[in-house]
Image (tube, rainbow, N blue to C red):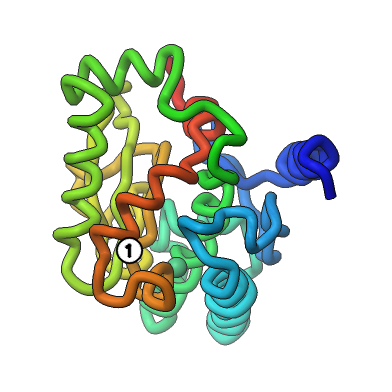
């Protein structure tokens, strides 16, 4: 496929799926595995094809399969996964941890695929209102990357680093363990709640095949494939 047709196919895939949170609220998300918006090898050399294939086809699929089983076991109807993680009180307590982990896994990964794009296919950094907000909040884009990268590096064990927009419109960098995310009211501290604009998976399954124990190297390389266009679209200026 030449570059032009690849971009056309990619654009169609993104337009046809509801992956990224946008405007003031995170978009709804059904319980199906979303199609990757690029080929598994498209993020090389920064993220290798085998990692992408296993991460998307096996890990993400497993969250969905396990979520469906947990909901069925608890007699909870299948619903918008974003609504589900935002208010887990609707889930019987016996099934809540299973749903929290697997619905979180499904939601977080659905966003994550869309927050990445082949290196050089879009803006190299945040632009427009988001770029201005990041600069005024963190001092500079590089300072933001430092803070965000440290949130990912220091997250003990498995989890995520996030750039969020809080209810008051302000930006913040937070991190969550496991598959928790900043929409999970009552699960994460209130100070970490907000709309995820960008998230980074720092579970070992996201990088171990290529980077082994070197999480900071993975994070440094990952900046090359951040889809700043998609990230900017999520920001409500
Ligand atoms: Mn993962």
Q: Residue at x 64, y 69 (%)?
A: 77
Q: Residue at x 58, y 44 (%)?
A: 117
Picture layout, residue 141 above or below residue 200: above
Q: Residue 90, image x and y in percent? A: 46, 63
Q: Residue 35, image x and y in percent? A: 72, 59
Q: Residue at x 22, y 22 (%)?
A: 140
Q: Residue 227, image x and y in percent? A: 52, 38
Mark 1, secondary structure of its residue: loop
Q: Is residue 159 left or right of residue 60?
A: left
Q: Is residue 121 left or right of residue 105?
A: right
Residue denoted by label 1: 202
Count of numbered tags: 1
Classify mark 1: residues with Cα within 10 Å, few (<14), some (14-19) or many (20+). many
Q: Residue at x 84, y 50 (%)?
A: 1
Viewer-closest of 145 and 60: 145
Image quadrant of ligand 1 equals bottom left
Viewer-closest of 83 and 123: 123
Picture layout, residue 5 above or below residue 102: above
The answer to whether residue 120 is visible is: yes
Viewer-closest of 94 and 165: 165
């Amino acid at each position: 496929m030449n570059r032009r047709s690849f971009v056309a196919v990619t654009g169609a895939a993104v337009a046809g799926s509801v992956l990224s949170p946008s405007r003031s609220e995170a978009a709804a998300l059904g319980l199906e595995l979303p199609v990757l918006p690029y080929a598994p090898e498209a993020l090389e050399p920064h993220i290798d094809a085998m990692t992408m294939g296993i991460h998307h086809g096996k890990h993400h699929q497993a969250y969905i399969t396990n979520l469906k089983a947990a909901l069925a076991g608890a007699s909870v109807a299948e619903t918008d996964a974003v609504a589900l993680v935002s208010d887990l009180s609707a889930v019987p307590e016996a099934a809540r941890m299973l749903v929290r982990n697997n619905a979180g896994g499904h939601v977080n990964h659905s966003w994550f695929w869309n927050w990445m794009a082949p290196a050089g296919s879009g803006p190299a950094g945040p632009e427009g209102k988001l770029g201005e907000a990041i600069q005024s909040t963190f001092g500079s884009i590089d300072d933001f990357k430092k803070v965000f990268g440290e949130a990912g590096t220091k997250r003990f064990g498995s989890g995520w680093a996030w750039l969020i927009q809080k209810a008051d419109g302000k930006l913040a960098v937070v991190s969550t363990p496991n598959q928790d995310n900043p929409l999970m009211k009552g699960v994460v501290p209130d100070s970490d709640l907000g709309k995820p604009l960008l998230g980074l998976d720092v579970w070992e399954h996201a990088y171990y095949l290529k980077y082994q124990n070197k999480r900071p190297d993975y994070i440094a390389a990952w900046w090359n494939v951040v889809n700043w266009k998609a990230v900017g679209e999520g920001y409500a200026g």
